[in-house]
Amino acid sequence: MGPLKGIKVIEFAGIGPGPFCAMMLADMGAEVIRIDRKGEKRFGRLDITSRGRRSIALDLKNQEGVKTALRLIEKADALLEGFRPSVMERLGLGPEQCFQVNPRLVYGRMTGWGQNGPLSHAAGHDINYIALTSALYSIGRPDSPPVPPLNLVGDFGGGAMMLAFGLVCGVLEAKTSGQGQVVDAAMTDGASALMTYMYGFKAAGKWNNSRGTNRLDGGAHFYDSYECSDGKYISIAAYETQFYALFLKTCGIDDPAFHAQLDVEKWPELKQKLTQMFKTKTREEWCALMEGTDICFAPVLDMDEAPEHPHNKVRKTFIEIDGVVQPAPAPKFSRTHPEIQGCPPFPGEHNEEVLSEWGFSEAEIENLHEGGAI
């Protein structure tokens, strides 16, 4: 069982970063109970980010449903929700109401803009949040609009992972202080934090505001992806001097123009030469030449290819559950091994099971059914 075994978490069902955060905690061994809305429809067993937890369905507009949620919260270490600010307060489940029944609760709030600020009540999505942080502006080619990096930077990196980190930090602190607190995880804050390295480069005069012209954004000829003769792609990251020298030697590049690796003015010309060179062989041929060397090379794999790559197979980076290929829990531990605790639940699938385990009597559960709370 994973390192968070024994930690109890209540998740109020949402979309995107909230479920991903809860998945991370469940993968690490936490017992996560998801509270779905009564009558909620999801896409069932294929809802991969819902894996590893059990679901109960409550009517939170029913006072008995709210009371039931509070009884569960009373026994939890942490809670996470992803509604707009003040929604949980209107339901009677805001931080102050929850702290009254559980003073040591760590209350996680996931939003795009944060709990305060002029944009805090506005709707938005990943691309909007990372647009405000300079992350979106910085990704793409100089002659094209910024490229949306899927919803990895805002929803998952800047949001879900930051909230998971914040919740674990809060639970650790509560074990010594006995006091809970609110974790305000804004995707704008998290995505900004992910840009720390680039802001350091900028302060040192080694990064400029022209997209696609820097060392790590595709501007440099030695750090980019290239198309091969078969239409597939490879990636090169021969950044350090010794790796760059090995790259030139391995590929038989003796053009003296390549000797000035960090001459920014020559990068467009050198990139064009590499573009032509890489189109002379297939991706497989380039892999045979460079993969596994210190050149810093990897083939660019699609979602069908990645699970089949030998390195990923040895490390069990991807797993298959009930015919569904999906990423395995990460990171790996030497002793407390993370594992997926179960398939994604249907809303309300575990009503009786969870309520019984968390202290509700049969009569109480029957009354909740009769009253329409579950």
Image (tube, rainbow, N blue to C red):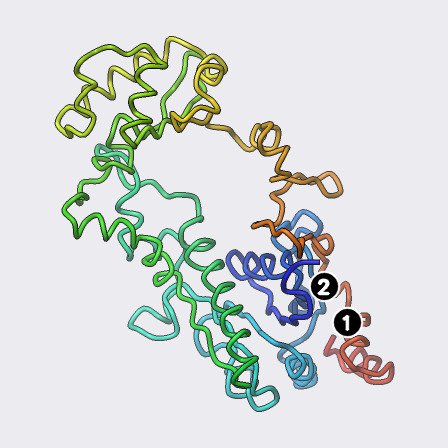
Residue projecting furthest to the bottom: 100
Query: Against 329, is 254 above or below?
Result: above
Residue projecting furthest to the right: 362
**Element type at mark 1:** helix
Distance Cα–Cα, label 2 vs label 1: 8 Å
User: Mark 2, residues whose alpha carbon is within 10 Å: few (<14), some, or many (≥20)?
Assistant: many
In the rendering, at what x and y percent does residue 132 appear? Answer: 28, 57
The residue carrying mark 1 is 354
Q: Amino acid at mark 1?
A: Val
Contact (CB < 8 A) between labels 2 and 1?
yes
Q: Nearer the viewer, residue 30 or 349?
A: 30
Q: Nearer the viewer, residue 242 or 64?
A: 242
* Quadrant placement of the N terminus: bottom right
Query: Against 254, is 131 above or below?
Result: below
User: Mark 1, residues whose alpha carbon is within 10 Å: few (<14), some, or many (≥20)?
Assistant: some
The residue sitting at 41% across, 16% down in the picture is 228
The residue sitting at 26% across, 52% down in the picture is 134
In the rendering, at what x and y percent does residue 195 appear? Answer: 31, 53
Q: Tell me, for residue 54, which label it has, or none.
A: 2
Quadrant of res 264: top left
The residue sitting at 22% across, 37% down in the picture is 214
In the rendering, at what x and y percent does residue 223 appear? Answer: 31, 30
The residue sitting at 49% across, 59% down in the picture is 160
Query: Against 319, is 40 above or below?
Result: below
Query: Against 228, is 35 above or below?
Result: below
In the rendering, at what x and y percent does residue 271 appear? Answer: 25, 21
* Quadrant placement of the C terminus: bottom right
Q: Amino acid at mark 2?
A: Arg
